[in-house]
Amino acid sequence: MLNLMFLIICLIIAGMGISLLLKMQRLKELEKRAEALNASLEEMDEQAKLIIRTDIELNKTQEELDKKITGLSTLQKLSREISTTLEENQIFKKIGKSYLEELGFEKSSAFLWDNLTREFHLYLNIGYNETESLKIRDTVNENKDYYLDLMHGGKTASSVFIPEGFLSKEKICHLFQANEFIICPITPQEGNQGFIFVGTQNIETRITEGEREIITILANQIGQTLDNARLFEKTWRSQQELEIKVEERTHQLSEALEELKRISKRKSDFISSVSHELRTPLTSIKGYAAILLAGKLGALPDEIKERLAKINRHSDELVHMVNDLLDISRIESGKVNMNIETLELAPIVEKVADLLSEQLKTKNITFNMQIPEDCNKIMVDRSQIERVFINLLGNALKFTPEKGSISVNAHCSNKLIQVDIKDSGFGIPQEAQEKIFEEFYRVDNTINQEVKGTGLGLTLVKHIVEAHRGRIWVTSKLGEGSTFSFTLNCIE
Amino acid sequence: MNVSFGFSQTRDHIRATNEAVGQAIIGLGNMHADLAIIFTTIEFTHPLVLKIANNLLGEIPILGCSSLGIITNKGIFKHGFAILLIGLNRQMFFNVASVKDVNKKTALLAGRELGEKLLYGYRNVRRNLSIIFSDGLINEGTSLINGLQENLGRSFPLIGGLASDNFTFQKTFQYFNKELLSESCCGVLFGGGINFGLGIKHGWKPLGKMRCANKSQGNIINEIDGRTAVKLYEDYLAKDTLELAEELRRISIFYPLGIYLPGEKEYLLRNIISIKDDGSLVTQGDIPQDSKIRLMIGTKESCLNATADSCEEAEKNLIGQKAKFVMVLDSASRFSLLGRQSLKELEIIKDTFGEETPLIGIYTYGELAPLQSISYLGYSHFHNQSISILAVGGQ
């Protein structure tokens, strides 16, 4: 019985031992599992750290990107507004509070340096009342050398970077009542330079490189627009000055022209009255000379006859001259009634040539005329235009030596007919060519001393051509002859 | 219930107030208004606008606060004056109250005082909902809630927001009738059967091992897992204390701490405000000693998903009723994180409740709300980085 009990006790102990062993084994397994779980928890925690570190960088990049996108889009809108402004004072007014807020700031001031007063003037004020802005302006001017250095150095100061030698971050923060800020120089190429301040009181904000770049671009844009505005103002002022000068000159010229007209009229009136006064005694002289020459008062000796013939001839010349003067004066004063009609050019030239045919023959001068069919019709006053040809052909005849040639050619273009009267005469010196149309001008040479003339023929011709709204000029070379050209209106 | 909304973003403060209040009054037509909720952005001349609003509204009680931005169904505005006029049905009941000098009195006592004042006249009336607007710079949000709930009870949700400024953390304003307050707290207690839906979410997910805040007091954590608290961030972010301090606001928004609450699905978020010289972390809101905490991670996407979830939850709670108005109490940190995508968040809310439903909201420095509204467990919490959406139906 005892043995049986002992056996049972042994079995129970053995069972308990086995159970203990099994439990210990299970505990070990659980410990191992807990260790593994702990290890994987630690592992996961390490992974969590990695995730956070990556996430923080990612967020930073994204924030910067977001800021850049917002900043650039605002900058684009702002640039568009600014660049269309051409008034210096209006440029800064375009930078409104809403744009500034979009850029992440709520305070801004802009100053431009005035070289004359040697101080900074405030052009932009956002986020400050009048007292605050005046205080800022005065303090900036007290420390103007710092700001001038910054401006001339083209450096940007910000709450994250203060250039060497500039005011401390604390001083700027205190003055502009901001926690974070950017101060950027405005540097137009010409005129007064300055700087712009932007800032925020938001303690969340940290100035980034992107924001610094955007404000620098904005400052450059302001600088360029200032240049444009100043250039525009300069150009506008010059134009205004020019306009005033032109107006003054025009006024002076008009007065001079009026004076000239008055003088010219007085001259014409004088010539006209003098000519009239001369013609009456001339007619008497010529009449008496003719009576004496005709022997109506008795026969005269040959010597007296000869002298009387001279008186008669010179009187004719004088009458001719007086008539020319009267004609010029009449044309100048517009007193001549032009009887404009459509005529053919060729018959007029032929008629004049016919009048001069005897002299042409005497001097053995060849006369040619080439007037094409298609530029034959002209609109002129017959008697006046005949005088033009008589004068020009007469002159050609006078100055062309024996066996020479004279030609009349015509050609048309743009409803104008150009007539060229060419001779193979002695030619006109260059310096005299511009003057020969002036009254009483005669070229000073030996030929002119031989060939007689009043010095009024070409003046009369010029007046007649101009009265027909034409133009007259001469081309000539000494020894090679001259070509007198004039234009008239033609019918195509 | 009659609701009318007015908003102006005019820069002239007097004109803005006249415009917004005028719109709201005209919008009401012949209906009456019992309560005005006013939100303004921080740069307004607050005494002036409150005086004008009072003159225009007569005896209508005013409740409200300042914010860094105003949320409306027309958009999000960094400058603006918004007003919501509410006319309640006969069966509905409400009481407004305020408490001053929160920090001086301690948040707990101030909470108790406000709770007591709000309860005035509530004998035998069923309480439904309390909305609180507090100064954004108070130290103990959790104590304030505890004090409030001690007196108000836990049978109904308490929601609210901490007024904000332009991230300068200098001064925020609260409006209570004719009084312009700071370092104060004001609120309204609704009762008698107001129908509302509530959604609260943040969207941040836990990452890494569960840790223990084994030495903490109020909103200061000294040690985590037996090591100086700042080591947690140094390890995870591979940055030294100085680098962390420089980027603390950003880091805190992306990677706040999450407190694990037994029985709750969501973690309670805590932003890090500063790092003390001894390596302790100062949080926005308290972290009880021995709390289980984890590092949290959030993205814009998760943030927007949380908004959608929050809207869905609020809509579900309305049980098929159309919202008369929607109030949004959105964390200022979310506004920072979302940036331009804040408008997407607004679109999500509008898509849920309809384009024309009056919408009024602010950005807050902390939110008061339960962790969930469907299985409400009787506790409201002090949140960071969350969005609370309150959709109010009729009766």
Image: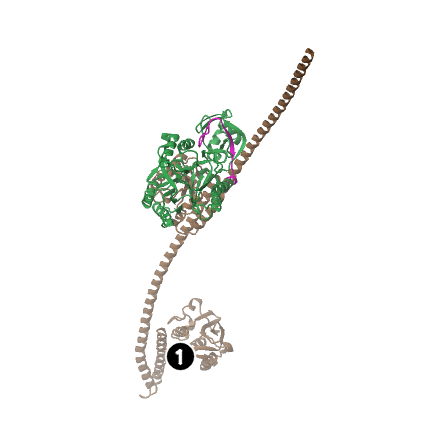
Task: Give the image quarter of residue A273.
Answer: bottom left
Q: Residue furthest top?
A: A2
Considering only vertical position in the picture, is A14 above or below A341?
above
Q: Nearer the viewer, residue A86 or A254?
A: A86
Q: Is residue B261 left or right of residue A319?
A: right
Q: Position of residue A405 (x, y in %)?
A: 49, 76
Give percent across and percent down for residue A323. 36, 78
Q: Amino acid at mark 1?
A: Asn
Which percent across, then down, holds residue A477?
A: 47, 69
- Comparing A158 with A151, the one in front is A158
Q: Colour of chain B?
A: green
In magenta, the rendered stretch is B281-303
Residue B299 is inside the magenta segment: yes
**Residue tagged by mark 1?**
A339
Number of residues whose C-alpha sits closer than 10 Å to that of mark 1, classed few (under 14), some (14–19) or many (20 or more): few
Q: Look at chain A in the picture and name its colour.
A: brown
- Here the colouring is by chain
Most distant residue in the front direction: A1
Quarter of the picture holding the N terminus of chain A: top right
Using the rendered image of the protein, determine whether residue B34 is visible from the camera's viewpoint: yes
Please determine whether, in this image, residue A333 is positioned above or below residue B100.
Answer: below
Nearest the viewer among A362 and B153 is B153
* Circle 1: element type: loop
The chain containing the residue under callout 1 comes to: A
Residue A359 found in image quarter: bottom left
